[in-house]
Image (cartoon, rainbow, N blue to C red):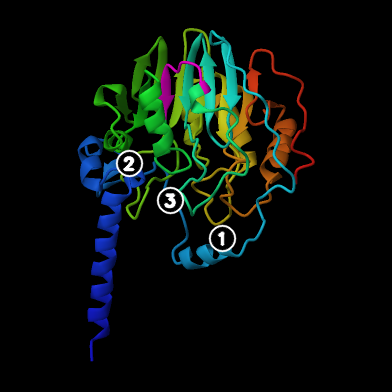
Amino acid sequence: MIGRGVLVAAAAAAAGWVARAAWGAVPALGASRAAIKPYAAASPRYRDSRFHNSDPSSSLPAGSQSGLAKAFLTRGTTGRPRREIPLATPLAPAAAGELAVTWFGHSSVLVEVDGRRVLADPVWSERVSPSSVVGPARMHPVPMSLADLPAIDAVVISHDHYDHLDQATVTALARTQETVFVVPLGVGAHLRRWNVPDERIVELDWDEQAEVAGLTLTCTEARHFSGRGIARDTTLWASWVIAGPQRKVFFGGDSGYTPRFADLGRAHGPFDVTLLPVGAYDERWPDIHMNPEEAVRTHLDVGGALLIPIHWATFNLAFHPWGEPIARVADAAAAAGVTMAVPMVGQRIDALRPPTQKTWWDELG
């Protein structure tokens, strides 16, 4: 009889072989741990071959993975709207404005600051997954093709999860735009694997900055995690300060709440606009995704003027109803006296003259 230990060892070996084979066969998985480590190892946040949050954080409670997987498979239509999500026709002025934001859905935003354009976390693929046939799919079309985007001065990436770093989008932008990719430590290794020229990649640790086209792009703290395969936290996650000579925007990327945002505000604020995540929260992972009320608190902590919510409406990544994030953040913003603009997908908001808010989401569920 074959012992159980032998069977377990054989299964583990087979799983390891499959993972290694998949890593070579599926470029979307990105770079290997070995390729990432030389760019990550010098960071004070990199210990024991992984990055760490400043505040202790757990992505999921121990032993909850199997129950969570079952819950996702049986959640039905939770998190989906009852009606079709409306799209606005994106506007792309010939010259970038003084301060404007175009929201393409989820966390993909085009930011105009002092006549320059920065594209943040661009994801144009149908699914946020290494597979084209399984994984969370879009709940609305992309409102503008990549080919129709205006000239981009810089692309910033918050971290390497599939809903924020998309191989197909990155490779298309590298081919069609003469832009620079500004990313947290380790993420550049993914881009190199996807044939983005090294001279067009700027890799930063928290509190480091780069000057691009007259803008100062500062990599700042977030409370999250990373990983595109089995390995976790091999690359850094970040928020971003996008600062021009006159105007300044804070892009929160994807983060749980942390009191350290108040320190960030004192160091880099105040901000004319904050772009903060409000969706995909759950009591099972409170450390790594802020809820809507915490988004308003973060806006206040960093010294924001206009709040524009992101990280909702496009991919079904949690268990809350589709419209709950925006309803909750609207109530919290009103209670705190915070000015907020909620664009339709594809809508360009002039942040110096925000339009009268229409609650376009109310009837969608």
- In the rendered structure, the answer to whether residue 329 lies left or right of residue 356 reads left
Q: Residues within 10 Å of mark 3 (few under 14, many from 20)?
A: few
Q: Mark 3 vs mark 2: which is more N-terminal? A: 3
Q: Residue at x 43, y 33 (%)?
A: 169
Crowding around mark 1 (Cα neighbors within 10 Å: few <14, some 14 to 19, many 20+) is some
Q: Which residues are magenta?
A: 148-156
Instruction: State the separation of the CA atoms marked 3 and 2.
Output: 21 Å
Residue 24 against residue 356 in the figure, above or below: below
Mark in front: 1 vs 2:
1
Q: Nearer the viewer, mark 1 or mark 3?
A: 3
Q: Residue at x 52, y 14 (%)?
A: 113
- Residue 72 is labelled as 1
Q: Which residue is mark 3?
A: 131
Q: Residue at x 58, y 48 (%)?
A: 281
User: Identity of the amino acid at label 2?
Assistant: Thr
In this orientation, which residue lies closer to the viewer: 46 or 90?
A: 90
Based on the displayed image, in which of its 4 quarters is residue 184 positioned? top left
